[in-house]
Amino acid sequence: MQASPCPVRDSGEAADASGISRRHLLVAGAAAAALPLFGSPAHASAPVPRDIRFIALWQGSPVGEHHVTFRMEADRVTVSTRIDITVKVLFFTVFRLKHVAREVWRGGRLESVESTTDYDGALMEVSGSATEQGFRIVGSEGPYLADGHLMTSNSLWDIRIVHETRLIDVQHGGEIGLFSRPLGDTQLGMQQEAAGQASQYHLITPHYAGRVFYDGDQRWVRALIEYKGETVEYVPEP
């Protein structure tokens, strides 16, 4: 018997949208350089998007990576995310995040998800699948029946996320709130695929916040995400 939905956790701290609040944060997101695929069932037969491989930089030095791969089989798209970031100061670890997730999408909706997360030694596992009533996800706080049409917290690769107000949380389980506002266009500079004009958005959730950048083809090309008061920059691998 499925548990009835618990109250939706909400972003709460969206009061100061002009900067990134300094609090305990997790990055979420899966990265891919592609037009949004899952806006309608018609997109299910679109070409497989290019994989994106981000390098994570802290104070200009590499501290990890964020990779996402896409695989299409018939009318299903499997999105695999891998995040491995560790920031150290002298001999001390400021934070460590390892996250592996596998999402299966079909006809514009999330069909299943499995993920494991290690955040500073705290281990979390999440699994979920679509039902007739919605999307049933099981995380650290138990089962939760979410809206079956929601995107996930790993969906930063799809620019549609900036118009969402709720997400399926694939690191902790349940739902989280999302606050977003546009920050206008900016010039990224002449480096690799991130060169040229990009639209930037400020996003806040209970677990991550920062700025994300999308190019003229609506591809996710850069990000600035805060972890425990430290900002990590995502740039494309050479």
Image (cartoon, rainbow, N blue to C red):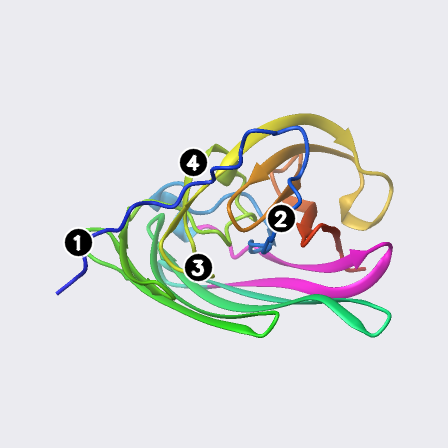
Of the residues under marks 2 and 3, which one precedes in the sequence? 2
Q: Residue 183's quadrant in the figure?
A: top right
Q: Which residue is mark 4?
A: 165
Residue at image coords 47%, 32%: 163
Quarter placement of the C terminus: bottom right
Disc 1 marks a residue whose amino acid type is: Glu
Above or below — where is 210 with respect to 55?
above
Q: Sort mark 1 into few (<14), some (14-19) or many (20+) by Cα contacts within 10 Å.
A: few
Q: Nearer the viewer, residue 198 or 83?
A: 83
Quarter placement of the N terminus: bottom left
Mark 4 element type: loop
Measure how far apart labels 1 and 2 are at the Cα level.
37 Å
The reply to whether callout 3 and callout 1 are in contact (CB within 8 Å) is no
Region rendered in magenta: 46-71
Measure how far apart labels 3 and 1 are at the Cα level.
20 Å
Mark 1 element type: loop
Disc 3 marks a residue whose amino acid type is: Val
Circle number at residue 132: 1
Measure how far apart labels 3 and 4 are at the Cα level.
16 Å
Q: Which residue is mark 2?
A: 23
Q: Nearer the viewer, mark 1 or mark 2?
A: 2
The reply to whether callout 2 and callout 4 are in contact (CB within 8 Å) is no
Give the dominant element type of the magenta stretch: helix, strand or loop.
strand
Measure how far apart labels 4 and 1 are at the Cα level.
22 Å
Q: Which residue is mark 3?
A: 170
Of the residues under marks 3 and 4, which one precedes in the sequence? 4
Q: Sort mark 3 into few (<14), some (14-19) or many (20+) by Cα contacts within 10 Å.
A: many
